[in-house]
Amino acid sequence: MKQILAEILTIGDEILYGQITDTNAQWISAELDQLGVRVVRKTTVGDQREAILTAFAEAEKRADMVIITGGLGPTNDDLTMPMLAEYFNSEIVLNESVLNHVKNFFERRGRQFTELNKRQALVPKVAQVLHNELGTAPGTWYERNGKVFVSLPGVPHEMKNLVKQLVLPKLSRHFQTPVIYHKLIKTVGIGESFLADIIKDWEANLPEHISLAYLPSVGQVKLRLTAVGENKQQLVEEVGQQVERLLPLAGEFIYGYDETSLEEAVGQLLKTKNKTIALAESCSGGYAQHKLTTVAGSSNYFQGGVVPYHNQFKMQILGVRQETLEAYGAVSEACVKEMAEGVRKLFNADIGAASSGIAGPGGGTDEKPIGTVWIAFADGEKTITKKLQLTQNRLLNIELTEIAILNLVRKSLSQ
Amino acid sequence: MKQILAEILTIGDEILYGQITDTNAQWISAELDQLGVRVVRKTTVGDQREAILTAFAEAEKRADMVIITGGLGPTNDDLTMPMLAEYFNSEIVLNESVLNHVKNFFERRGRQFTELNKRQALVPKVAQVLHNELGTAPGTWYERNGKVFVSLPGVPHEMKNLVKQLVLPKLSRHFQTPVIYHKLIKTVGIGESFLADIIKDWEANLPEHISLAYLPSVGQVKLRLTAVGENKQQLVEEVGQQVERLLPLAGEFIYGYDETSLEEAVGQLLKTKNKTIALAESCSGGYAQHKLTTVAGSSNYFQGGVVPYHNQFKMQILGVRQETLEAYGAVSEACVKEMAEGVRKLFNADIGAASSGIAGPGGGTDEKPIGTVWIAFADGEKTITKKLQLTQNRLLNIELTEIAILNLVRKSLSQ
């Protein structure tokens, strides 16, 4: 089966100079991917004639479709429309239907329609117009020798609406697209190379049409399985079988799939087990509480938490004993254990979890260097503790502690 | 003066397929822009030999420097290093200094060093190694006919550290870039168009060689002054004079300059005024505590905080009165006032601050729709409250609440 190839072209000085992030290209990639189209390149060029024409020609050589965003405003620095006209040897004409739409658009909002706005209705004669309900700059569609160019506005919600409503169905009809299926397998608590090592036989035995990629990020590694074929249902089943084979090898590190985040996975687990949680965070400064509460509906299982940044409050609020602090210090197994147990009681929760450590850059000693962190999980029956030896970087230590706390809760609840 | 041109090349299937957003390219663009280098194109290609080699050749033709990120992991799908070796007709050799670094890196973390990890030390013989302190994949530097290729790891904090510490100074020497001086003026609590309006006369009177850009982000607007000339000291003085003229117009919204974050500015203010602070966060779920504690040395003024996610704990832990909650509800001026006063006492702090609101997506009513948030500041003499009407988006509401709390503390302390 012939693989349909796409290139995504973003036009605009503001993206080239780093003043705004291009999130459109990522979104379009993901949509094309779902359609079974393989994006082979993304390019950003500025608002310059030569750069745009060269990019058109290069993309047309390599890909079957070229999806273009940006450069459609009514001002002189917006060049996409005239460049498309030049590239497709077409004249620019006033499109009456677009003109009426733009006029109505301004009228409905009680804003004045100016000569400048009229320019939005100028499109290459050869183009098919894709009507932009949500804005004034129209999308346009071009065909030549079986290849397709699509030009879309840069404003994200306008672009997305056009893609969903008009572009994807039209592309799907034009190219009879193959089927690609992706599954993300999300792991935590193991580094990329160690994970690669324990799953190497499984990886070596993947069938030809299913490929594997490692996607590491701070404290986590995602595995992506990509299957190419003709039947979606069959690919879903085959990938599912591979995941089944992976579970005995790496299941303990897998917290979820696809869009699920670690905080969502932990929240889901708490909901399923009908447990509530409270947190006491010293070195992680409330970051784990923040992550848990980014999840909508977290008030169903998150009771609350404390950030006791000094020993005095670890004692007064959480009931850590003075003798514990005197004998072992705040960064100790004994202290973090009492913190987890204390916060559990304070918030009348099923589970208490806690962190205490040296985030840096100050505060390290020979015995307890920067990056020394203790975490704990308490559920009233048992208290599990863990010592981490993290990095020299404060922000990274905060993030890694947060991930370790959530992972400790996950593992303890999964047993 | 000759304009130095750059291209940025991102390598990785995960970015092509839209599974992660490439934020590196934007960050690098902005850094190069500060150096006076003009980025002419950004390109993303996948982990395929032909695509990478073609992208190298095309970029070398157009630009003076090519900055590459990604594709440096130890697994088989990472191709950047072998492709660079091929492109520069060089063999791959084991670099002893990188090998020792990688070994130490694993040793210090008490993790096992495997054969796979050893691959990180394989670099093209022709490359100059840029030592990556924060990770295991080294940066590398190549020169040919006056042009420069730089390969960097895709992990953002590793890449950024290498760029700041090694790459920018090296590029500046190699290309003898002109003298450009930037100053960022950071504002909070005012929208872009309102700010533009109150400073329009000042902006119109800027000298030719000093330009102004507006850089808006969530809840904040940065103004960037860029001066181009030949003498750094003179540019610094001239920009300083312009800032002096700006202060009477917009000084109340300015919290800091250049790299200073809002949480650092608030921390500095607390330190200067010799005040301590404690926070009670309901709808912001600990995010303001997290931001404050990302600042090194924050234990000097941050006492701690509470996230009382249910009414019961607002009463039990913070002393909010049952009558208050019954009469006005938790999202009310009266409640947030008692929260701020309560947390101040609990943590024996000079200042207490608090938030209570409806982050969404559930919980909104006609009277208190999603995005309704109350914040408060208490210092024992007075309590200042403020009502915010934010968005429909949970994450945005959490972030905007955090910024509003810190800004309320800043303004109250500045008076």
Image: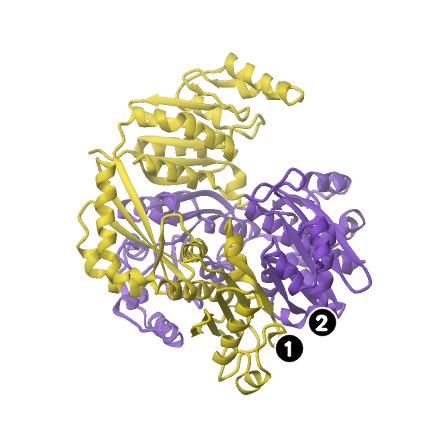
Chain colours: A yellow, B purple
Judged from this view, the residue extending furthest toward the top is A96
Check the image and report above or below for B227 versus A113: below
Q: Is residue B184 visible?
A: no
SS assignment at label 1: helix
The image position of residue A30, as x and y in percent, is 38, 40
Are discs 1 and 2 both within one chain? Answer: no
Image location (x, y in percent) of residue A276: 49, 60
Count of all numbered marks drawn on residues in the image: 2
Nearer to me, B15 or B146 = B15
Q: Secondary structure at mark 2?
A: loop
Identify the residue at horizontal 56%, vertical 70% (top origin): A282
Q: Please tell me which residue is depicted at 69% across the width and 50% down the height of the picture.
A: B374
The amino acid on which the numbered mark 1 sits, given as a three-letter code, is Gln
A353 left or right of B142? right
- The location of residue B74, given as percent across then percent down, is 30, 61
The chain letter under disc 2 is B
Residue found at x 57% / y 27%: A76
Say if mark 1 contacts mark 2, CB within 8 Å.
yes
The chain ID associated with circle 1 is A
Circle number at residue A414: none
Q: Amino acid at mark 2?
A: Asn
Q: Quadrant of the N terminus of chain A?
A: top left
Q: Is residue A187 left or right of residue B184?
A: left
Mark 2 burial class by Cα count in 10 Å: few <14, some 14-19, many 20+: some
**Left or right: B217 with respect to A124?**
right
Where is mark 1, residue-wise? A312
Rendered view: B261 above or below B25? below
Q: CA distance from mark 1 to mark 2?
A: 10 Å
Q: Which mark is residue B348?
A: 2
Residue B320, picture quadrant: bottom right
For the C terminus of chain A, the image quarter is bottom left
